[in-house]
Image: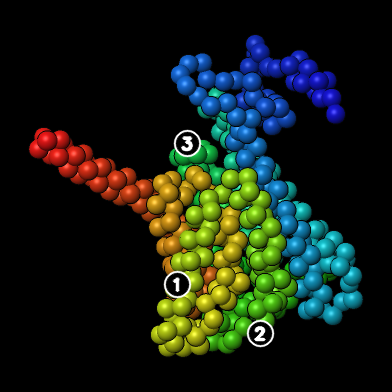
């Protein structure tokens, strides 16, 4: 399809003169539609058509399987709880109508703040929110009030990112900052067993439906089978339940090189190792839970694929990525088992390791420098000794 007409239209409306202050907004839409023509003027550099916006779009595409399944699961869980005779499309349509306002609010609030900061600073609009704006509604309960969601998005964008300079400068994952804000500010909407299933069409109170994590925290074995948890046909945060749908997104991220396979694999290795350790201890029923159940419950898989691999907030060195991922998985399972008051440990684990990532990289680099220094010293002695 010939898009020359659109490119000419963009060139025609390029702001100048008294409208030049709107250039940041214009540039955001222009570079979203077309690859930027700007290149570095000097020095060696690599030309690549895949800029930040294109990388973020790949992440958004990778989220679509989990998003579509999450919409269907909202309707399915409501159908199971109410006894309604809905077909699969009715379930999906119900979930779509429930999630659409959340997505709209998330993008509206977040992009407004992003554009406002870009205009004030005379900077380019940060494109990172293209993924963050979708991630936030996907990791919170579907019953989260829209005004609370708007506050969480504003807090995540302003405090979690913009105060540090915008995309690429933040040290905490903005989507998890939004969830943490909701969890600590409005805990009754983020915990318990009545927040995970959408209310019915007439707006009555939320329908009770215990999640596997909630059942374990209460001292009971999960009523859902491992297959149900793998498929995702269980109550839970909006789009975190289906491991299969999440795996489809993981494949795309790994094939395109957007996400680090080292981090993704090490998160599961760390969680599995901690789960096996608890199996050996076997002090209570939670410790005796098969280690692979931790991969299927809560936000473990979603966090490992889409949150821990955030290239901005994760460790940057290859060795550091292994350490970073192993500790995320281990801490997540440790928090789940040892803190019944907070059964879902993935959020706090990733946020904690976001803070530790720079220290991990510093130690890895310092160790490499020291090791190379010793190697050079040894080589120098051998040369001098002839």
Q: Quadrant of residue 214?
A: bottom right
Location of the N terminus by quadrant is top right
Distance between the Cα atoms at labels 2 and 1?
24 Å
Which residue is at a point 41% across and 46% down the rendered structure image? 317
How did the renderer colour the structure?
A: rainbow
**Circle on res. 8:** none
Percent of width and height locating residue 298: 59, 70
- Looking at the image, tell me whether mark 3 or mark 2 is earlier in sequence order: 3
**Circle on res. 165:** 3
Local secondary structure at mark 3: loop
Residue with the mark numbered 1: 273
Label 2 or label 1, whichever lies nearer to me, is 1
Which residue is at a point 64% across and 30% down the rendered structure image? 49
Location of the C terminus by quadrant is top left
Categorize mark 3 by other alpha carbons within 10 Å: few (<14), some (14-19), many (20+). Answer: some
Q: Looking at this view, name the residue that lies furthest to the top.
A: 17
- Whether 372 is drawn above or below 343: the answer is above
Local secondary structure at mark 1: helix
- Whether 101 is drawn above or below 188: the answer is above
Q: Looking at this view, name the residue that lies furthest to the front.
A: 386
Residue with the mark numbered 2: 223
Label 3 or label 1, whichever lies nearer to me, is 1
Local secondary structure at mark 2: loop
- Whether 122 is drawn above or below 88: the answer is above
Which residue is at a point 20% across and 44% down the rendered structure image? 374
Q: Quadrant of residue 303?
A: bottom right
- Whether 128 is drawn above or below 183: the answer is above
Categorize mark 1 by other alpha carbons within 10 Å: few (<14), some (14-19), many (20+). Answer: some
Q: Nearer the viewer, residue 279 or 165?
A: 279
Q: Nearer the viewer, residue 200 or 224?
A: 224
Residue 188 appearing in the image: no
């Amino acid at each position: 399809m010939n898009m020359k007409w659109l490119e000419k239209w963009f060139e025609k409306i390029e702001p100048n003169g008294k409208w030049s202050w709107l250039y940041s907004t214009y540039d955001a839409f222009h570079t979203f539609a077309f690859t930027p023509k700007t290149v570095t003027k000097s020095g060696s550099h690599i030309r690549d058509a895949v800029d930040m916006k294109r990388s973020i779009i790949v992440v958004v595409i990778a989220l679509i399987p989990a998003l579509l399944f999450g919409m269907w699961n909202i309707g399915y869980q409501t159908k199971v709880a109410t006894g309604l005779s809905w077909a699969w499309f009715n379930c999906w349509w119900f979930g779509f109508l429930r999630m659409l306002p959340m997505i709209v609010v998330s993008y509206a609030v977040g992009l407004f703040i992003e554009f406002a900061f870009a205009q004030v600073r005379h900077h380019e609009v940060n494109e990172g929110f293209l993924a963050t704006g979708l991630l936030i509604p996907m990791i919170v309960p579907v019953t989260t009030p829209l005004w609370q969601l708007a506050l969480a998005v504003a807090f995540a964008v302003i405090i979690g990112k913009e105060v540090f300079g915008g995309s690429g400068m933040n040290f905490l994952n903005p989507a998890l900052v939004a969830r943490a804000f909701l969890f600590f500010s409005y805990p009754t909407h983020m915990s318990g067993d009545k927040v995970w299933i959408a209310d019915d069409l007439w707006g009555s109170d939320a329908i009770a439906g215990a999640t596997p994590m909630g059942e374990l925290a209460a001292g009971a074995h999960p009523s859902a089978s491992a297959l149900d948890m793998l498929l995702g046909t269980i109550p839970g945060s909006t789009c975190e339940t289906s491991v299969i749908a999440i795996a489809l997104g993981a494949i795309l991220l790994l094939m395109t090189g957007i996400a680090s396979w080292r981090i993704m694999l090490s998160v599961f290795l760390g969680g599995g190792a901690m789960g096996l350790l608890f199996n050996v201890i076997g002090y209570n029923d939670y410790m005796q839970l098969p280690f692979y159940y931790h991969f299927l419950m809560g936000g473990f898989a979603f966090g490992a694929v889409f949150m821990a691999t955030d290239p901005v907030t994760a460790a940057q060195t290859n060795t550091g990525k292994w350490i970073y991922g192993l500790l995320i998985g281990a801490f997540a399972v440790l928090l789940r088992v040892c803190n019944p008051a907070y059964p879902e440990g993935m959020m706090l684990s990733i946020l904690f390791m976001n803070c530790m990532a720079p220290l991990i990289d510093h130690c890895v680099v310092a160790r490499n420098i020291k090791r190379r220094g010793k190697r050079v010293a040894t080589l120098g002695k051998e040369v001098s000794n002839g």
